[in-house]
Amino acid sequence: MIPRPRSRCLILLLVLLVVEGFYLLYTPPYKNPDELSHLQAVRFYLSEKRLPDPYRERPKIQQDKHPPYTYVTGALLLSLGEGWFRGTESSIRLPGPHEVELRPGKVSENSGIPDGALYLLRAFMALHWLLFGWALLSLLDLCFEGRPRFAWGLALATATIPQAAMSGAALTPDTPLTAFCAGAFYFMVRGALGLGKAGRAGLAAGSFLALALLAKSAAVHLLPVLALASWMRGRRKGGGEGFRFLLWALVVPLLLSSWWYLRNQILFGDPFQMRAQVETYTHSVRRSPWTLVFFEVFFEDTFRSFFGFWERESFLARPFYLLVAGWVGTAASGLLLLFRRAPRSEAPPTSLAALPHSLCAFFVLFGLTLLGNLTVHSPQGRYLFPVLPALAVAGGLGWTIALRLRRDSKLWLVLPFLWITYGLLSFDALFLDRYAPKRSHAYGSGEVLYYEDCGSPGLHPHRVQGMDVPDGSQLGRRIPWRTVDGHAEAVVYRFPIPEGWRRDLQVRVVYFNADPRLPYLAESEGRFRYPAARMRADGRLLHEEIELTSTPETYVFPIPADLLEDGSLELRIEKAKGPAVIVAELWIERAFLRFEGRGKVWNRTGRSLEALVLWKKDGLVGSAVLEVPARGSAPLDLGIPGDAELRLLPHLLSPWVSTQAESYPAGGSRWYGDRTAEGIYFLRGRGVVARLPVPPGKLLGLRPFVRRKDPGGGWVWEEMDFSGSGAGVPLELRARADTQESFDVCRWVGGWR
């Protein structure tokens, strides 16, 4: 049973509402394309009550080239809603694998408005995406009459293309532009087919066209489509009908939107402000775009960002693009088959009549986009979203012919949901991973001052020294710990620390060797070791050398408060061994554990944590591993004298000094153990199976731990009884002669510095 048209439309809008709600809430503030600069324009219209001048404003309004619809409506909404959120202290933690917390009252230093006001503006934009869904479904129902399941599935799949759906809930003129273009295109196709009265159809098409022209100048691509629709209506119903349709369609744009383009022509000599853009953004202008590399990059990046997310680092997996390219090629081959009479006779007649309008819209906008890139190179697929309805019609017709789709299968109701699931999972893995720590790593309370996805200097301005080390074999499949910083001597980051953050801070770091094959170090004994790094905060050593393996490793180190008194923090990750140093992720955040009073420890996190507590009194050092209950419980009383000097570390997660040792079998042959072990080496054998070098310097309170395979098949940490023969001699881990246990990594944990 097929639901009635109204029911199908309602179901589609409900699904889109859920999807857009997800992107609206989970996309971190100002992480949509140009969202901050669009908000700058909104605030300018709100405060100045006039149009910006591209030559006069200081600071320059970056989006002054766009018509005012998005900014005027946004300013009106902001004037009503900004005060709703100021002073609000509440926060909402969203479900999912990442630490995403909404703080409506938080005011960004860059924007000056509460985050809640931004979410309100995003919600207003999302309403336009629902309008887009309605217009798209109406168009496809018209073009594929008698195939309601196919039309519904195609509409939902088109409206939930990952980048398109994400932009649908973003503060950007692209969203109303796409919605209004979809409405205008639908009524232009209706007019071309001779449906409805000429005046009413033309007025509807012209109203949407006028709104589109007020949203963004890319809407001019519809003018040739309007001319084509008028001509085709004239052929169907007489020249007078076509002329009346064209006249009524032009009345509203001439009255409502022509003033913007006339103003630009009079003031700047160009209706689209391109001349002003070139003169005010000379650094962005391409000098010699007519090269093969330019066109290769333009076509590739436009195609990939059309389906994937807007950042180059967030492109979707390469197999996905191969699959999409196959579907696009199938649709194109189906359209080519229309040159033959037999396939044309099988095509849905309304979609066949709408095809010239679809091709006209696509090629005109694509040509305009290419011309714009010849001046300012910015190959982004979202610039083609206004022709999504045209592409849906052309693609649906091509697939119908190429695949000989004669039945309206129920499969079309299922496939879009698989597509939506893939898009949301990709957003989670490729986008949220860049801006929100995973709950599995984010033990803290979510109070993150800075997060650095190392290897993305354009997104994070705190890097002082380092260079990107891309994983070339994984282009299009990058995730944060696969984009790393590297340097021959040291990677350096420098952070300003606000006054309210200068106590109880910690640094959390992920080390990852992007290429586990290189480089190894051969020591004099012939043993191989990974490259190693150490970290300093303002010159003070936070940890001794840690080996960098092909498995991402997370460590946490407290930052001494006296280092932050001058309001800055320099982190230096320096090479200890090997030809270079590499680092993947950094967090500057509130410490997970802190002392409350003397001898009591309090847990900020939502889970219990083991803590290694060190104390020193009268030259004597003691240590204990304690379970600190989760946030909400009373502080844990350590039973330590109140005048003792204390150190506190999350147990094992945060080795103050760490060295990882590899296999060292006594018999001269090398045993490899379980394949699930960390890195590339693991320990198994008899007698001496590992040697753990004693760290240099006077380091009191160190405890040796090893990761071993337990009977249940998992890896567990346990404190081991190492033995050594004196200062400077590595401690040796011995396994019993009657067993072949698998050992993995040995570490020093703790340390009084």
Image (cartoon, rainbow, N blue to C red):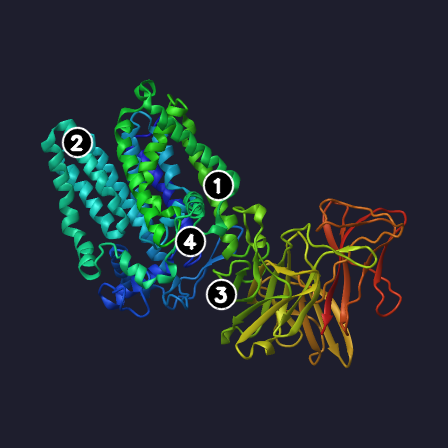
Disc 2 versus disc 1: nearer the observer: 2
Q: Amino acid at mark 4?
A: Leu
Label 3 – label 1 distance at C-alpha: 32 Å
Classify mark 2: residues with Cα within 10 Å, few (<14), some (14-19) or many (20+): many
Number of the label disc, if any, that sits on residue 25: 4
Q: Secondary structure at mark 1?
A: helix
For the C terminus, the image quarter is bottom right
Residue type, mark 3 in image:
Pro
Q: Is residue 298 above or below residue 227?
A: below
Q: Reading the chain from its start, which is encountered first: label 3 or label 1? A: 1
Mark 2–mark 1 distance (CA, rounded to whole Å):
41 Å
**In the figure, is residue 686 to the left or right of 564?**
right
Instruction: Tell me which residue sits at (27%, 24%) in the image.
Output: 349
**Mark 3 touches mark 2? (CB < 8 Å):** no
Q: Which residue is mark 2?
A: 233
Marked residue nearer the N-terminal end (2 or 1): 2
Residue visible at 70% across and 51% down? 679
| Residue 461, disc | 3
What is the quadrant of residue 536 in the picture? Answer: bottom right
Residue type, numbered disc 1? Tyr
Instruction: Give the image location of residue 40, x and y in percent.
Output: 33, 63
Q: Which residue lies under the disc numbered 1?
A: 422
